[in-house]
Amino acid sequence: MSNAPARAELTLRGLVIGIVITVLFTAANVFFGLKAGLTFSTSIPAAVISMAILKAMRDATIQENNIVQTVASAAGTLSSIIFVLPGLIMVGWWTGFPFWMSFGICATGGILGVMYTIPLRRALVTDSDLPYPEGVACAEVLKVGSGSSEAAAESVESGGAGLKAVLVGSIVSAVFYVVVQTRLFATSVSSYFRIGDKGAATGFDFSLSFALFAVGHLVGLWVGVAMLFGAVISWAWAVPHFLLLHPSNLAADIAAAGTAADMAQATWSHDVRYVGAGAIGVAAIWTLAKLVKPVTSGLAGAMAAARVRKAGQAHTLARTEQDMPIGIVGLITLLCLIPVAWLLWHFSTISGLGGHTALLVGGGVLFVVILSFLVSTVCGYMAGLIGSSNSPLSGIGILVVIIAALLLVLFVKALVPAEAGKALVAFALFITSIVFAVASIANNNLQDLKTGQLVDATPWKQQAALVIGVIAGAVVIPPVLDLLQHAYGFLGAPGANPATALPAPQAGLISALAQGVIQNNIDWNLIGLGAGIGVALIVLDAVLASTTKSVRLPPLAVGLGMYLPTSTTLMVVVGALVGAWFDKRAERGPKAEPTKQLGVLLASGLIVGESLLGVIVAALVAFTGKPMPLALVGDGFATPAIWIGGIAFVACVVVMYRWIARLGQGTSAK
């Protein structure tokens, strides 16, 4: 098998197509992740787009398509750095994203993520029975598109329907977003009101966003219900409760104005978000804790099996077993640690901690080496178990930043003056971002390698392709982050306008934890209350799991529902309900799985279209200095805009889902 004939796999055209898709999807994912607190998997949409392009060329192979989606998958993973890096803006350390430092974090961390997972491939992919749901699904799409699957003759993707779904979703969401920016359609449907006569207030805010709607479709019914449950906890109980309990926390101008919206939003921002943060932290750590035993036993058993197998065929490995040589892996790892050391040295020097550079750099590199390997192992296993999109990466970020902050308190804080506390917080976030970049790629790499195993790909070529994707993504992320920072800002950052700022929930939580550990300036009672709610949610979910067949209430999703604004949460819930209805309806037809897959591709397109236009509009905001540069009407049109926008949104949903259902059943697939 090692003498298999040559075939098109790692080609220049495949790399170019993959890089173009990576650039577009990375920009979309950065914007969307900051807005919604979630990123979307790009492998399957990239595979569909790649198949459509390569079909028009000669001699395209399934392996070449696989390389394209491998490169592009970096967009759905490395962009997760937005869960940490904006924290440096939120704590007031950075005012923008320095390109070379931000690029260095993304590139070195991402390449280390690829290198660390290479030795794990045989243990967690080849000799493992982990399901790898997204990797298997992507492989099926590739097989269908190439005609190598038995289902190809019946599948809608073989007729180009998959590409139609992605394109239609992208066009509809992009056009709708542009009309919203003209203010002819409302941005959201919201209402805030007082409760009783003691000053309590609450409300809701439905964002008319197809991207948020699509995320609901992708995350599924019970995650959507869990987020709704979290929103109810925050806005039906916590906001009125804390508003009555701590009215003095409101700013004087808000208290004087007394509008229900201002009072409710101020209370949510000052108190309730930290309760949600506590719930997220406990839920994320619990999710990780449940994986400790399977990670340990799975690695031990798989590595033992790999040693036995390798002993008899070290020189006759099949093409699907040819990893990047371990010597090159070690060399690249060492070379990556050089810029890591430089980044830590440079950051400590410019932050005023230069007197302790040796300690910070030496300890920091050791921290990156050890923590990166641990998170690579855990993330790789999590991805195989529950999929890359569902892995609790926020839990990784929470654990890493707490460990980093504690180590700085134990070994460095006593050596520096009190005013250096802010610099220590920034250093904790900086080093956490490097490890988090490793974690984000490790969370995806093994998923790609599972896809490759199922389509007879060569592992080392995939590993090289992912490195290229990492570099392409690392080039795009800093300028997009910088653009969005100057156009909108991040919620909680100095000078940010809460009305227009991007929520960036994970970055807010992680930066708050770094400050809390190092400066002790966070209300731990609120975090503790949230942690208690998180424990109760874990128990409730366990009871549901043991007493029902399918009803679940994922604690992490409930925590996100508590922490995110309703403008984000409620439309995700709507999308989850519509997606569940669509899947149920599809199951009654003759082509259930292809139809449901088209629904996933339509949702992916909805996210991509709006997110890409969001980046373009952000550029217009930054360059013109106008918050709504495309506006055609003023505030006087606000009420008609709500009705017109709401009706148009519902009409688009009905028309798109009826069309995609017919397409899935083959009535218009040709």
Image (cartoon, rainbow, N blue to C red):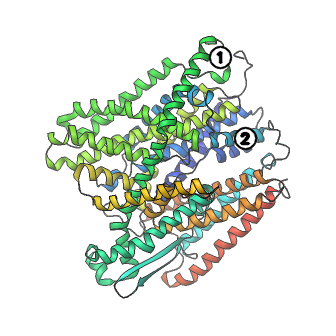
Check whether the beta carbons of the residues at disc 1 and disc 2 lie within 8 A of each other. no
> Label 1 sits on what residue type?
Leu
Q: Residue furthest front?
A: 547
**Residue 662 pos. (x, y %):** 81, 61
The answer to whether residue 634 of the structure is visible from this angle is yes
In this picture, residue 523 sits left or right of residue 202? left
**Residue 7 pos. (x, y %):** 73, 25
In this picture, residue 11 sits left or right of residue 123? right
Q: Which residue is mark 1?
A: 317
- The local secondary structure at tag 2 comes to helix
**Residue at 57% across / 63% down in the picture?**
225
The answer to whether residue 31 of the structure is visible from this angle is no
Instruction: State the CA–CA distance, disc 1 to disc 2.
Output: 25 Å
**Residue 336 pos. (x, y %):** 41, 29
**55 in relation to 251, above or below:** above
Q: Which residue is mark 2?
A: 140
- The local secondary structure at tag 1 comes to loop
Q: Which image quarter is the N terminus in?
A: top right
**394 in relation to 383, above or below:** below
**Residue 312 pos. (x, y %):** 63, 11
Foreground residue, 412 or 608? 412
